[in-house]
């Protein structure tokens, strides 16, 4: 007869001794870097929402932010989310059309997307220009100095903070970074090359960052099934992005759908279906006859997310349904071009 | 919370090993380190909301992150592979010095023959040192549901161990000696108790 105590003792004894040893080694190896990177971010700050929108690769972006970008990038990311909102250059003004008219516009985008060509080639190169407040922004400086005062008792990070503060005086108030993401459509692995703003010219390769073309092809294109998938995806992110629990279903749908719409690997059919889902999701303001920062004609879709307290807007190409520009509070991403390659293009900013 | 960095550093120092150990059980070392770091990044961002005691909450976040990385089938394979990969000679030696009636390999195979949920319930309260109430929080269910889950897991493990024991006796009588534990378990289910 095997009792509960027997099974309990037996499972306890099956615990591999290596677990404790590896845990101890991992702690010693990671402690300094983890504390330096994490404490460089203001407590209570959310992940950089702009990155969630730009490629909708958020499942790995957080990990990438920790392990790849280093202290400097972590500080930059922190500043993106901690600075006070400033007025957007794209203020939604009249004419604001009614919901029914908004739905008609979204259905037109759906039709346009369905017939737009998809970029060919295994490697898809997406060039975007990200702009927002830099380390030199007054609010960010104040936040950093406040952090430093609080962290003066943490020796592991104090030195690095002092070094960051020293650079502040030389920095402009706003920062623009051109970023080229090359996505392998067969594996989702992404290479990121950057220029401007003092950022490294290349980030470590992020494996399986995006769903592949084949994976996107398995997604439903019926409105109800796709909507359910989007809501399910958003809710599964609660661990990573806790504010999702405070968002309405419509807000979750908008957040997810616009994230995916910016991904160049999705098929015309899926892009078309996403617009149909949006057409049946109330809450957005749709404005025709708008233009993006580069002056390209656009449909502007904006909404305020009460759950995350973030104001978002995207500018869509009316002829193809592709995203031209996305704005999240005071962070803007302009998508300049998307091109396909048979082989992996080199880093244009590398030495 | 007067000094968030100090509080966070204390949490990190006290619980990193627990979180990393849990992640190691479910993911390869590199991924486990990333998950542990993500858990503490989330902890920092939500420092005001981290409950007391913090460990169930921390492991719950780790569990959610790990579940995002792999589907159910892959999780099941990963869990099995990880536990086998983490088990070494030192475990065998330690096992041999204990008063066990079954071989370690058979016991390990019996544990790994259980559904993922059972293995999780059993290891949360043994390897990770949680009581049933805290383990329920990690597993995302009520304490009552977890108690039932644990009870069933123990019962299924006892059945698997009995089957393994029968198979050992059966194979010992056969020319050619032992079969693999996995085959043994399958074979033994059709046998009667000796």
Image (cartoon, helix red, strand yellow):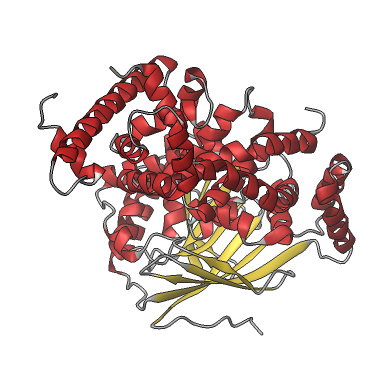
Q: Quadrant of residue A241?
A: top right
Most extreme residue toward the bottom, as rendered?
A351
In-image side of A173 versus B13 (left or right): right
In-image side of B79 versus A92 (left or right): left
Residue B157 image point, x, y percent: 30, 27
As rendered, which of A347 and B135 lies closer to the eye? B135
Tell me what residue is drawn at x 13 percent, y 46 percent: B175
In-image side of A329 versus B162 (left or right): right
On screen, residue A100 above or below B2? below
Tell me what residue is drawn at x 16 percent, y 36 percent: B170
Report the label total: 0
As rendered, which of A319 and B53 lies closer to the eye? B53
Q: Quadrant of residue B67?
A: top left
On screen, residue B43 above or below A80? above
> Is residue B74 in view from this perspective?
yes
As rendered, which of A56 and A223 lies closer to the eye? A56
On screen, residue A45 above or below B162? below
Tell me what residue is drawn at x 68 percent, y 55 percent: A77
Residue A140 image point, x, y percent: 80, 51
Q: The C terminus of chain A lies in which quarter of the figure? A: bottom right
Q: The N terminus of chain A lies in which quarter of the figure? A: top left
Residue A282 image point, x, y percent: 41, 40
> Is residue A93 in view from this perspective?
no
Residue B36 image point, x, y percent: 58, 45
As rendered, which of A87 and A78 lies closer to the eye? A78
Most extreme residue toward the top, as rendered?
B144
């Amino acid at each position: 007869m095997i009792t509960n105590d027997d099974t309990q003792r037996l499972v306890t004894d099956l615990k591999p001794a290596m677990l404790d040893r590896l845990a101890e080694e991992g702690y010693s190896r990671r402690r300094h870097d983890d504390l330096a990177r994490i404490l460089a971010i203001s407590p209570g700050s959310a992940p950089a929402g702009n990155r969630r929108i730009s490629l909708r690769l958020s499942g790995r972006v957080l990990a990438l932010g920790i392990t790849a970008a280093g202290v400097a990038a972590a500080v930059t990311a922190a500043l993106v989310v901690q600075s006070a909102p400033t007025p957007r250059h794209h203020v939604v003004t009249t004419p604001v059309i009614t919901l029914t008219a908004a739905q008609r516009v979204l259905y037109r985008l759906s039709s346009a997307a369905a017939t737009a060509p998809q970029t060919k080639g295994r490697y898809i190169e997406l060039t975007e220009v990200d702009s927002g407040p830099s380390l030199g922004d007054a609010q960010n400086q104040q936040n950093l100095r406040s952090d430093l005062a609080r962290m003066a008792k943490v020796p592991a990070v104090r030195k690095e903070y002092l070094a960051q503060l020293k650079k502040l005086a030389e920095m402009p108030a706003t920062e623009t970074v051109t970023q080229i993401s090359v996505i392998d459509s067969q594996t989702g692995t992404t290479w990121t090359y950057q220029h401007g703003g003092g950022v490294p010219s290349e980030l470590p390769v992020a494996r399986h960052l995006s769903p592949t073309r084949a994976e996107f092809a398995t997604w439903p294109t019926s409105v109800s099934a796709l909507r359910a998938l989007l809501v399910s995806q958003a809710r599964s992110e609660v661990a990573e992005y806790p504010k999702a629990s405070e968002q309405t279903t419509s807000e979750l749908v908008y957040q997810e759908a616009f994230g995916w719409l910016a991904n160049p690997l999705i098929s015309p059919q899926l892009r078309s279906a996403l617009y149909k889902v949006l057409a049946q999701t109330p809450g957005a303001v749709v404005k025709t006859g708008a233009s993006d920062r580069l002056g390209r004609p656009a449909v502007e879709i904006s909404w305020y997310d009460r759950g995350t307290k973030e104001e978002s807007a995207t500018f869509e190409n009316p002829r193809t349904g592709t995203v031209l520009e996305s704005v999240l509070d005071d962070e803007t991403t302009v998508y300049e071009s998307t091109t396909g390659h048979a082989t992996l293009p080199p880093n244009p900013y590398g030495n | 919370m007067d000094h968030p960095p100090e509080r966070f550093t204390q949490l990190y120092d006290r619980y990193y090993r627990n979180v990393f150990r849990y992640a190691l059980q479910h993911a390869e070392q590199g991924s486990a380190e990333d998950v542990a770091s993500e858990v503490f990044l989330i902890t920092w961002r939500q420092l005001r909301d981290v409950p007391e005691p913090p460990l169930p909450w921390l492991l719950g976040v780790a569990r959610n992150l790990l579940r995002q990385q792999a589907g159910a089938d892959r999780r099941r394979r990963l869990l099995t592979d990880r536990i086998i990969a983490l088990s070494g000679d030192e475990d065998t030696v330690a096992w041999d010095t204990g008063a066990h009636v079954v071989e370690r390999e058979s016991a390990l195979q019996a544990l790994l023959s259980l559904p993922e949920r059972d293995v999780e319930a059993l290891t949360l309260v043994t390897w990770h040192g949680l009581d049933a109430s805290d383990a329920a929080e990690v597993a995302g269910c009520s304490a009552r549901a977890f108690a039932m889950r644990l009870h069933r897991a123990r019962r299924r493990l006892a059945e698997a161990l009995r089957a393994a024991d029968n198979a050992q006796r059966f194979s010992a009588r056969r020319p050619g000696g032992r079969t693999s534990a996995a085959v043994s378990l399958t074979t033994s289910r059709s046998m009667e108790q000796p």
